[in-house]
Amino acid sequence: MGKKNRLFNIKPGDTLSFGVIRVAAGVQFSIYLPDGNDCSLKFYYTGRKEPACIIPLTKEYKRGGVYFITITGINGDTSGRSLIQILSEDFEYMYETKGKEFADPYAHIIHGKTNWGKALNDSQKRLVRSGICLDEFDWEDDHQIMRPFNEVILYQLHVRGYTKHSSSGVKNKGTYKGLVEKIAYMKELGINALLLLPCYEFDEVQEEVHIYNGRPIPSDKIKEVQSSTRTDNTSSYVKLNYWGYGAQGTYYLAPKTAYASDKSNPVNEFKSFVKAFHKEGIEVLMDIYFSPGTNLCLMTDCLRNWVLEYHIDGFRVNNDVMPALALVSDPVLSGVKMLASYWDSGLLQNRFGKFFAEYNEGFMNDARRFLKSDEGMTGSFAERFKRNPSDYSVINFITHVNGFTLMDLVSYDIKHNESNGEMNRDGTDYNYSWNCGAEGKSRKQTIIVKRMRQIRNAFLMLLLSQGTPMILAGDEFGNTQSGNNNAYCHDDSITWLNWRHSKRETEILNYVKKLILFRKKHSVLHQPKSLPMHDNKGLGLPALSVHGTQAWRVDYSNYNRMLGFLFNGDYVNDNSGATDDIIYIIFNMYWESRTFDIPSLPTGKKWYTAITTYDDMFYEIPVKKKKVRAVKLNKSEMELQRKTVVPPRSVVVFIGR
């Protein structure tokens, strides 16, 4: 061992957690290797091909299934630098067992993967190594925000694609710093939480695709084809895993270096990014997809690491791999937001706060079908719209990363994934979309008007629902992927947001801003728990009720496409004790106008039109007076208080005050 290691002074260690950590005696390295095989820790000067030293990990360093070793000092000239500085600035490391090198799965930084989308040759792959990052970071007074789910407006985005387009107007395009440059835009929009697509280290290069005479051929057949034709008529391109789900070469504890503007220190840049968003009151959540078979301890330590080291506010995890029990039982993880496809209510009893939310496509599918006027959807949509479980929250969305954007949802009847190179066989065939009369882009004004109206309807369904709304980044200004509903392999104009807005796209953006503000102003629309569907306080109206064209008589029949929801703001109060307005939302998803009854209000209150999606109108409502007095109405006004005609495929919102 002495011949192989003359560089560092070492001794056995025994401190959790795994990876590289500071300890009282120096710096500890640890690796889980339960099979009992011999293992070596190899140190390299950064970028060098040959190791600077090799430390055999013998039994004296093993505790259970883990090798622990502590470096206490370094021999030779240190130029006045500390051990921490030398290790962080000069070295990278690898482990070797059975003659094979591998990077530390607990590494906080991975060297050699700085350039996005570049396929590495064998020599470059050998330089992909574990880096050492032991820098102190000044968080100042930063902490997790932990905003209640009912106050969250969630925004799902891809770190690279959000600002990579030349129109983004940021200096650091496609990076964490680029997101920071967009904080002002996000605050003006009204969102207060991000959900980031995978931004831990992964291999985005999925495979190299070879093309011969316009057709893809397998890599193992390329030489055979070239030999038989005696000419090289082939071309090739790199196929990417742009999203990062299920990618190879994943290191769950390391921020993705290719998303950093400073490739030498992605750790500090990611921390600075989180810190900047927290200062502006915006939470940062991460989407972490664990591959089947991932070690449970690694998954738990991964999530803890992002919470403790990076101040992440929560996660979306695939709980078919990561057990829900581990999430709700962990002392650290049970106190941050957790999004999963389902929760067992019994599992969440007596837990610390309401930090768990259901994330699945249930709301999306039912809302899309109701939006496009499918039969038999009133009952399903009504339940989704008012659903707000007591044990956990629900994340409602009409679009997310996998599928059509909102503009494409109203512009295409079928998917158009030809550019993916899979002959349009990939992606779901069940989009529940309606192109409003023409497939794809159209200049016909009647079709454009219908599409804009459907977009307004969709956003109202989403943002006035009782669950936590999530907007797919770019939907707020009509981003399109040209009908591609599975753009996982595109790193181009299909997935990069175009920030040059047309007049119509600006209209969508302004509408969404107003609608988010409307939601925030009315606490009855975002309650922390379910509203009772009865008047248990004797206030004259139940907290929540569902209606049809006739007040108090909901129609869930197969042919019906009309619903009304009445929210009684007298049942809620804010921190000052003030109550909210009464709000009545009427959905007419039928293709003709329909007359609706309007429920009678308690004495002293009057109905006012607040929003109409048919003509994109938000109306000024008179300020509620402190003293309640009878409102004298003439005959015409009285009739308007009893009935209203709702135009086809549109929504009307009334306020009673």
Image: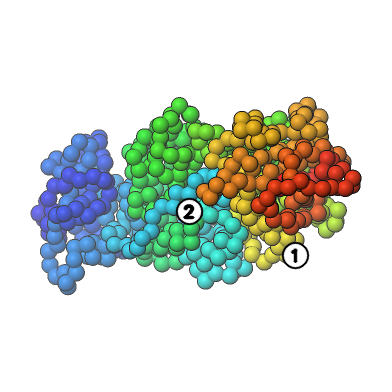
Q: Residue at x 40, y 31 (%)?
A: 350
Say which residue appears at 81% left-offset and 34% top-offset: 549
Q: Is residue 569 left or right of residue 309?
A: right
Outermost residue, right side: 635
Q: Is residue 497 among the parts visible in the rendering?
A: yes
Q: Is residue 51 left or right of residue 521?
A: left
Q: Which mark is residue 283?
A: 2
In this view of the protein, which residue sits in the foreground, 101 or 466?
466
Residue 128 visible to the viewer: no
Q: Eyeballing the image, is 554 above or below 595?
A: above
Residue 314, percent from left and from top:
44, 47
From the viewer's perspective, is the residue at label 1 or at label 2 nearer? 2
Observer-nearest of 212 and 31: 31
Q: Write the residue at 48% across / 29% down.
A: 345
Q: Residues within 10 Å of mark 1 (few under 14, many from 20)?
A: few
Across and down, in percent, residue 655 comes to 72, 47
Q: Amino acid at mark 1?
A: Lys
Q: Residue at x 34, y 40 (%)?
A: 331
- Provide the residue designation for mark 1: 503
